[in-house]
Image (cartoon, rainbow, N blue to C red):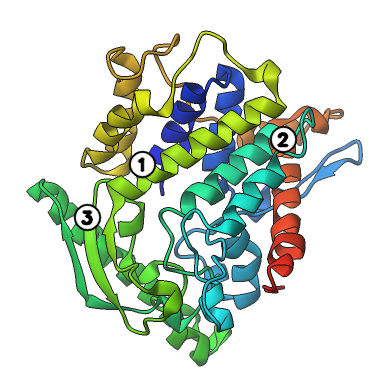
């Protein structure tokens, strides 16, 4: 999934569930920031002796970090490809499954911290990971033959001819970047890793098709198994709509633990917004265009009738810029910064997933 869903969709669903504007904004910012927190250089050492060390929750597609197996398990597994625990072999059980039992356990755990300052950020991070199970299912967050696909078998339907041309062009660029990365770094990372890297981490073999909500598409696995049985035929609209309902129910549970966050002006059942959500998800376009569809849905009161007329601006990038500015200050209250609370939440989440939840389900990755 991309910013259109992780930020704009998340904010919309949180508001529809009845969460107040400010909290919905924090949740949506945190959900999208999982994809944007890629810069290790943002570590800050302040003049008063305090410091912030970032918790990296993603990498750019062309980053060499993606080819490091240990790093895959610290980043992609807990934040983007939550294991689904289906199958007998270890690599099968690492394959992500939508709305899995492990994913539901993760949702419940994030509700255990009411009134903690980082909880809203944790809910946002958890929202991202949970939503990704509905896009990334059928693939795992490690280099594995289970992720290999017959790229010639990929077939999809797009009504817009110009969009189809752009998608083909971007797909070619995507694979060219990956190939360039491997050739450039093969002496450093080892030939064996290079051979396994192309199409063997996450859904790289199918480019960004799982992240486009409007697509209906099919493909064939090179090495089908129990964990991927029947997962090669995709209707992204229907699957993303399932994610919307799962998030809606999650946010309703959040309000039970945090009743002060309820906006009493909003009283919507999921059935009240289901058709409107399907309409927005079905619209074809690049991610920026798809983001504009969510914005328009807010401006058009006939679609989503909320008190506010606009979705607030995404603030993730400014979190980092604000922190860099504070880095030159003699004094700074770190615990009040949004990015600090995000890092605390990310640390809690990563530790829980890798050291508690997965081992409890007999999966040990680190």
Question: In front of the other: label 1 or label 2?
Answer: 1
Kindly indicate whether the residue at mark 1 contacts the one at mark 3 (C-beta within 8 angstroms): no
Residue 218 drawn above or below residue 278: below
Location of residue 295 (image quadrant)? top left
User: How far apart are labels 2 and 3 at the CA level?
Assistant: 36 Å
- Residue found at x 32% / y 15%: 299
Q: Which type of secondary structure does the marked residue at label 1 adopt?
A: helix
Counting from the top left corner in percent of width and height, residue 168 is at 19, 61
- Residue found at x 33% / y 83%: 222
Residue designated by label 2? 119
User: How far apart are labels 3 and 1 at the CA level?
Assistant: 13 Å
Sequence order check: which comes first, mark 2 or mark 3? 2
Number of numbered labels in the structure image = 3
User: Would residue 158 appear left or right of 299 to someone viewing this image?
Assistant: left
User: Would residue 307 appear left or right of 337 to someone viewing this image?
Assistant: left
Say which mark, if any, is on residue 216: 3
């Amino acid at each position: 999934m991309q910013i259109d869903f992780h930020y704009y969709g998340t904010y919309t669903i949180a508001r529809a569930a009845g969460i107040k504007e400010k909290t919905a904004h924090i949740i949506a910012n945190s959900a999208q920031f999982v994809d944007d927190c890629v810069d290790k250089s943002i570590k800050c050492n302040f003049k008063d002796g305090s410091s912030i060390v970032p918790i990296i929750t993603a990498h750019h597609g062309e980053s060499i970090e993606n080819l490091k197996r240990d790093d895959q398990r610290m980043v992609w597994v807990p934040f983007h490809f939550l294991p689904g625990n289906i199958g007998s072999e270890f690599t099968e059980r690492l394959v992500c499954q939508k709305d899995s039992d492990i994913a539901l356990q993760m949702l419940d755990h994030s509700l255990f911290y009411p009134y903690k300052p980082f909880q809203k950020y944790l809910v946002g991070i958890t929202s991202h990971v949970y939503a990704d199970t509905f896009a990334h299912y059928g693939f795992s967050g490690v280099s594995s033959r289970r992720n290999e696909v017959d790229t010639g078998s990929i077939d999809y339907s797009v009504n817009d001819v110009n969009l189809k041309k752009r998608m083909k062009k971007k797909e070619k660029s995507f694979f060219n970047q990956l190939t360039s990365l491997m050739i450039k770094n093969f002496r450093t990372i080892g030939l064996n890793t290079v051979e396994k890297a192309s199409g063997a981490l996450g859904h790289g073999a199918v480019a960004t098709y799982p992240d486009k909500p409007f697509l209906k598409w099919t493909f064939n696995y090179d090495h089908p198994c129990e964990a991927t049985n029947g997962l090669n035929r995709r209707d992204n609209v229907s699957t993303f709509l399932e994610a919307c309902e799962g998030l809606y129910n999650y946010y309703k549970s959040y309000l039970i633990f945090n009743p002060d966050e309820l906006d009493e002006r909003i009283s919507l059942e999921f059935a009240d917004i289901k058709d409107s959500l399907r309409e927005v998800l079905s619209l074809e376009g690049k991610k920026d265009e798809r983001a504009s569809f969510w914005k328009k849905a807010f401006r058009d009161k006939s679609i989503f009738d909320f008190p506010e007329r606009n979705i607030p601006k995404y603030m993730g990038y400014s979190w980092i810029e604000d922190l860099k500015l504070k880095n030159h200050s003699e004094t700074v209250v770190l615990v009040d910064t949004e990015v600090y609370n995000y890092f605390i939440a990310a640390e809690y989440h990563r530790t829980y997933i890798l050291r508690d939840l997965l081992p409890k389900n007999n999966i040990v990755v680190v």
